[in-house]
Image (cartoon, helix red, strand yellow):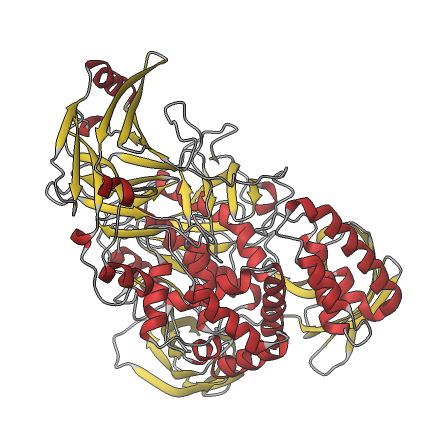
């Protein structure tokens, strides 16, 4: 299994300036500078519909060198030139300018509801503790920050970002691609979120850890609308469909089981599994149940693959059917986008070229399939424009937004596609081999130097290139408004062209037609287009005829609909489904009943009916199962967690019905003797409740004998935890004992969450008053997961005080780290 989570990409070094605090606040911009700091006092107002989040308002605070409380507490510090910034759920250490820091925290807050939805839970104590993220201005600056945090290797040679097992923090640095700069922070922070759930991520195999992170980071971001769509299947830049198809056919069509059992990282295949399992309401429920069971099993890294394999087959009812469905899903994938050439970037629905090469004409093909068993162009469609004429399938348009300084240079435009060569058709099915792009038929329309339109053809005989000058009115409008719409209508003998621009609130139009021969008319297709660009950064937004408008339902920031079917009763569905899985021998028809309900979710018109049937089943299951169905039907979670290293009781009530909890809290010492008892009784409404627990200096364990009452159901259980939390690998000097001629220095070292820890502890004693040869002692380290060992060193007494330095040089489940502790003996 991969020991360090990483993303392999080449990068360029980018410079950055020092961030400075700034106070500004309004309803549409982040509030920066107000002293709030506590997560509970900060807002992240996000509207969520399906996989799309829209930012309304969030708070961002500049902390400078003040290290915030995160899930990396005690294992992450300050670095030269870096400062800390916080939002509600995230703490970002960065040397980037304020504008970049703000963007990344906005993206993470928009992604956060989707992190929660994909894992089915939020990290414990997220109301008071944040997830740590580091984003440096270059590879070398990030490596410096990692060395500061005790990592001996620093950033991986080929990584664009890494999330480290030891301290649960994601480390990122920018590549030359703007899309990837956003991608990497969403990806790596997904790993950090994963680790925050229960301390580590190695309980899940690569196809889950990397598959979920790659899938959620496969995004489209609209900076104008402040809108992020995650889990995008069909898009242009960093196209994992093409990556996955190439890997699938090159590996001879592997099964899910084969991909699970192979620890090698195959990003495209992982991406396919995640999207396949989440592409139907029923499979999505089974996948969520599988993820929860795997997390609760919590296998060590060497047992992760085998545990996941067996759980997959025991969770999904008909595994051979799932495997066949996966094969059918992949073999029928038809991507809508293909970057033939050029470094294309995407902002919302607009595409632009990252570089300004003056010689190469870049091409992006957009050919949405007419029928598909997977999502097609699954991000918000472009907003209507008064300059766009698209009304039927014979029409297509493109809106060009010109960079003012580049208005009079380069080419930008659109092409209609004709026939594709047999060789290129084969390539587009598997993406194995090479394509010959010049063999494809194209009818190209390019605005050149902002002054005229060139009409040319590729691989069509007897077509002579033409050009037409833009009218003075159009040119004047371009100077004023910087926008031009190209509207095309394909007719029986010609292509009709309408150019529209805006000048002084008036639409300026230029119209003409291009005669076409029979061969061209028979092959050209207005539903298959190419975007073309050269030597500029103009943005071009395509408008294609879409007979199926985007569906919307009423939603607020408090009522996030993170499921792609926009089903408002999804939480109840989760609880009823889990009840069926755990108690099906008492409710034997539940699978069929739920399957019939789940089949209705793709139709919004049937959602009310599905909700009524779910509520009926809930009441029926309560009557049938009585108290045995409490945990799944209520969805109530009650367990002991830690805040600032002190235990508290976290109770989550996900329903609208009140919950009553009564409990006896008992503190026990190391000899299992009772120290203190405490009675607890609360009535809890919907939501998360963090309840403080009593503490005593000599307490080692805490037990809670609890009785929970919800609706007509009652549940009793006993919780047992240590008073001090387990935090993975940690080194602590416990105490030193003075004897007649020596000291005994006692150290505690704890093991990792998963995998082995090996290395050495080196104790060095040094005089404060004179230079003497170093006196060092060394002990070898070999720790299993969750193991704690005590190491005792004997230090000879001297007449003068001496410094004791303890270094642990360790390999923690694949991560080389260095820990240091010091004390003075006198």
**530, 286: nearer the viewer:** 530
Q: Where is residue 488 in the image (x, y as percent from the top left)?
A: 31, 31
Classify residue 755 as left or right of residue 351. Answer: right
Q: Which residue is drawn at 60% across and 69% down?
A: 725
Q: Which residue is drawn at 45% across and 58% down?
A: 215
Quadrant where the image shows the N terminus: bottom left
Question: Against 485, is 128 above or below?
Answer: below
Q: Specify whether residue 130 is in view.
A: yes
Q: Which residue is drawn at 19% across and 14% down?
A: 472
View extreme (front): residue: 518
Total numbered badges shown on the rendered structure: 0
Classify residue 207 as left or right of residue 352. Answer: right
Q: Specify whether residue 695 is in view.
A: no
Q: Where is residue 471 in the image (x, y as percent from the top left)?
A: 20, 17
Question: Against 209, is 482 above or below?
Answer: above
Question: Against 754, is 455 above or below?
Answer: above
Classify residue 412 as left or right of residue 226. Answer: left
**708, 337: nearer the viewer:** 337
Q: Residue at x 39, y 27 (%)?
A: 389
Quadrant where the image shows the C terminus: bottom left
Q: Position of residue 778 (x, y in %)?
A: 37, 86
**98, 265: nearer the viewer:** 265
Q: Where is residue 453 in the image (x, y as percent from the top left)?
A: 18, 28
**271, 157: nearer the viewer:** 271
């Amino acid at each position: 299994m991969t020991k360090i989570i990483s993303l392999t990409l080449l990068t360029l070094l980018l410079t950055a300036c020092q961030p400075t605090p700034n106070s500004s606040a309004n309803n549409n911009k982040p509030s920066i500078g107000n002293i709030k700091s506590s997560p509970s006092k900060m807002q992240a107002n996000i509207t969520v519909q399906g996989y799309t989040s829209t930012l309304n308002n969030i708070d961002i605070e500049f902390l400078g060198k003040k290290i915030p409380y995160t899930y990396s507490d005690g294992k992450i510090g300050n670095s030269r030139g870096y400062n800390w910034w916080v939002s509600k759920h995230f703490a970002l250490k960065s040397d980037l300018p304020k504008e970049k820091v703000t963007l990344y925290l906005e993206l993470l807050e928009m992604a956060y509801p989707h992190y929660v939805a994909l894992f089915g839970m939020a990290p414990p104590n997220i109301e008071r503790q944040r997830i740590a993220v580091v984003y440096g201005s270059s590879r070398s600056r990030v490596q410096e920050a990692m060395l500061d945090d005790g990592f001996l290797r620093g950033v991986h040679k080929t990584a664009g970002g890494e999330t480290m097992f030891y301290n649960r923090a994601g480390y990122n640095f920018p590549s030359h691609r703007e899309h990837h700069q956003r991608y990497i922070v969403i990806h790596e922070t997904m790993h950090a979120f994963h680790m925050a759930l229960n301390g580590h991520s190695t309980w899940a195999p690569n196809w889950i850890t990397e598959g979920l992170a790659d899938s959620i980071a496969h995004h489209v971001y609209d900076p104008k609308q402040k809108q992020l769509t995650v889990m995008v299947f069909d898009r242009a830049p960093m196209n994992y469909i093409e990556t996955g198809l190439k890997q699938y056919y090159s590996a001879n069509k592997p099964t899910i089981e084969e991909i699970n059992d192979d620890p090698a990282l195959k990003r495209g295949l992982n991406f396919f599994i995640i999207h396949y399992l989440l592409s139907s309401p029923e499979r999505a429920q089974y996948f969520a149940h599988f993820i929860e069971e795997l997390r609760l099993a919590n296998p060590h890294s060497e047992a992760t693959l085998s545990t996941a394999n067996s759980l997959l087959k025991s969770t999904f009812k008909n595994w051979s059917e799932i495997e066949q469905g996966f094969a059918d899903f992949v073999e029928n994938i038809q991507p809508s986008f293909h970057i033939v050439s050029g470094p294309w970037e995407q902002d919302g629905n607009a595409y632009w070229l990252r570089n300004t090469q003056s010689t190469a004409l870049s091409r992006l093909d957009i050919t949405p399939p007419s029928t598909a068993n997977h999502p097609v162009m699954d991000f918000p469609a472009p907003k209507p424009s008064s300059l766009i004429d698209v009304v039927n399938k014979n029409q297509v348009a493109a809106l060009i937004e010109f960079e003012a300084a580049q208005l009079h240079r380069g080419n930008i435009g659109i092409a209609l596609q004709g026939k594709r060569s047999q060789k290129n058709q084969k390539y587009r099915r598997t993406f194995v081999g090479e394509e010959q792009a010049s063999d494809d038929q194209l009818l190209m329309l390019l605005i050149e130097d902002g002054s005229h339109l060139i009409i040319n053809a590729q691989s069509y005989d007897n077509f002579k290139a033409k050009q037409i000058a833009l009218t003075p009115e159009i040119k004047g409008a371009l100077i004023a408004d910087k926008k031009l719409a190209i509207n095309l209508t394909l007719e029986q003998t010609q292509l009709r062209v309408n150019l529209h621009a805006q000048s002084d609130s008036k639409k300026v139009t230029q119209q003409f037609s291009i005669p076409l021969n029979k061969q061209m008319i028979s092959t050209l297709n207005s539903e298959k287009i190419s975007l073309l660009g050269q030597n500029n950064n103009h943005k071009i937004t395509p408008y294609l005829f879409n007979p199926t408008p985007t569906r919307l339902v009423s939603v607020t920031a408090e009522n996030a609909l993170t499921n792609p079917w926009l089903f408002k009763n999804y939480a109840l569905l989760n609880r009823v489904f889990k009840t069926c899985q755990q108690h099906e021998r008492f409710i034997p028809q539940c699978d069929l009943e739920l399957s019939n309900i789940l089949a209705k979710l793709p139709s919004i018109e049937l959602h009310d009916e599905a909700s009524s049937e779910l509520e009926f089943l809930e009441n029926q299951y309560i009557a049938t199962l009585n108290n045995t169905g409490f945990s799944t039907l209520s969805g109530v979670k009650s367990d002991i967690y830690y805040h600032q290293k002190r235990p508290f009781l976290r109770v989550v009530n996900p329903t609208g019905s009140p919950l009553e909890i009564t409990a006896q809290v008992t503190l026990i010492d190391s000899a299992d003797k009772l120290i203190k008892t405490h009675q607890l009784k609360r009535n809890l409404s919907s939501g998360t409740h963090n309840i403080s627990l009593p503490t005593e200096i000599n307490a080692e364990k805490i037990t809670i004998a609890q009785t929970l009452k919800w609706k007509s159901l009652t549940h009793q259980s006993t919780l047992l935890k240590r008073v001090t939390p387990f935090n993975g690998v940690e080194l602590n000097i416990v105490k030193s004992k003075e004897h007649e001629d020596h000291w005994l220095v006692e150290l505690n070292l704890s093991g990792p969450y998963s995998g082995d820890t090996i290395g050495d502890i080196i104790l060095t004693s040094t005089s404060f008053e004179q230079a003497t040869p170093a006196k060092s002692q060394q002990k070898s380290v070999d720790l299993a997961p969750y193991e704690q060992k005590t190491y005792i060193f004997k230090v000879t007494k001297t007449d003068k005080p001496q410094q004791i330095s303890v270094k642990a040089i360790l390999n923690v489940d694949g991560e080389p780290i260095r820990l240091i502790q010091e004390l003075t003996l006198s």
